[in-house]
Image (cartoon, grey):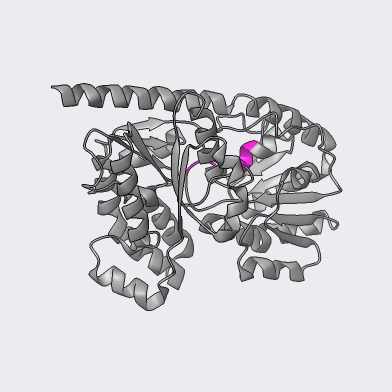
Amino acid sequence: MCKELPHAKVVGGPIIVYNRIKYLSRNHEVHLLSFYNPEDEKFLPSLEEYCSRIELVRFPPAKGLLGEVYRYLFSSVPSYMLKLYSPELKLKLNRMAEEENYDCIIAEYSFMGQYLYRNRGIPGQVVRVISVHECYTDARLKVFRVKGLSWEGLKAYLHYLQLRKYEFEMYRSADKVLTLTEEDRATLLRYAPDLKVNVVPHGVDVEYFTPEGWKPAGNVVCYLGNFGHEPNVDAVLYFYREIYPEVKREVPDVRFYVVGKAPPPEVKALEADESVVVTGYVDDVRPYLHMSKAMAVPVRLGGGFRGKTLEALASGVPLISTRLGVEGLKGREGEDYLVADSPAEFASKLTSILKDEKLAIKLSKNGRKLAEKFSWQHGVRKLEKTLLKLVKDKAEGFKK
């Protein structure tokens, strides 16, 4: 199960799901149940090759402020989780579980974990796995710490209060919880030390993302992201307001490309600055990577693994990020990529990449070598091994 259609051209987290499907289908029968938008239907051929059954459900409509307040006050399920609750999807899941002899159901993203939790429509012998791309409790707390006593900050804190019990009860109900990084595993265990958590790493297609075409078109800085995800919006606005002005003072001809689907009005408004380009959805991110002298990942919110970092490194694009943004990479700071957490330090180090060709070339070559360690096959083999053991252990438990 996935919270949005995972296809070959998707930008952001669902690319993990697409590649897991692709590689698992070599040895196993894979079915997909996912939310989708009608415009996503053109991408179905990239999935039909690997899935013997695909069931889709339209995203549930937004409830508005009054609806969210009502759910916050009167629902036993956190209102944050209910944003992606659909009775239709639950019915489809239960029908699929009844019709098919599943060994395992994987909920990709914690939003989808709610469909496994307390669901008696799924046979008891089916292994239930929740793949946590981001701990929502911790993510909401980060938003509160960054936004403070603003409306956004207070709303995030209210979500945190609701989530902190429910989210970990949901994880405990699963046969296994997966994370993308050791840091995320440690976060979950900090909240719930008794959880059964395995790390299954992210990957990148190093044959698709290559450095051969890397020819920067001047001092171009790039950011990739799905802007339906709040941390990407915050990262771009934070970069433009707190970091970019200093970079422009040092490098007057710098340009900032914001690449990815669903940019909200506040991101689109940045194009009032002639040095900023907001592309919206693109079929292929590689041309934007290859024209960039640097990839900036100034994320402050969220968790999980940022696939954009691997795509940049594999493409030979020098990377500068906050420490949060490179969790899971396990590279060498200053050699494979640069790390900066304050606006002044970020601006200074980014300026160094733009001005110092030797530094840029070193980061480009070393970053590519690091990316080559993250093949999809490695991560999916680890996932497959975990799932096979879970299925075997549960089957033996039912025999006793």
Q: Residue at x 82, y 33 (%)?
A: 358
- Whether 310 is drawn above or below 1: the answer is above
In the picture provided, is 292 more to the left or to the right than 203? right
Left of 85 or right of it: where is 400? left
177, 135: nearer the viewer: 177
Q: Quadrant of residue 240?
A: bottom right
Quarter of the rendering containing residue 264:
bottom right
Image position of 262 (left or right of 350): left
Looking at this view, name the residue that lies furthest to the bottom. 66
Which residues are drawn in magenta? 304-310
Residue depicted at x 55% and y 25%: 377
Residue 375, position in %: x, y? 59, 26
Residue situated furthest left in the rendering:
400
The percent position of residue 119, horizontal first and vertical second, equals 24, 48
Quarter occupied by the C terminus: top left
In the rendered image, residue 53 lying in the magenta stretch gets the answer no
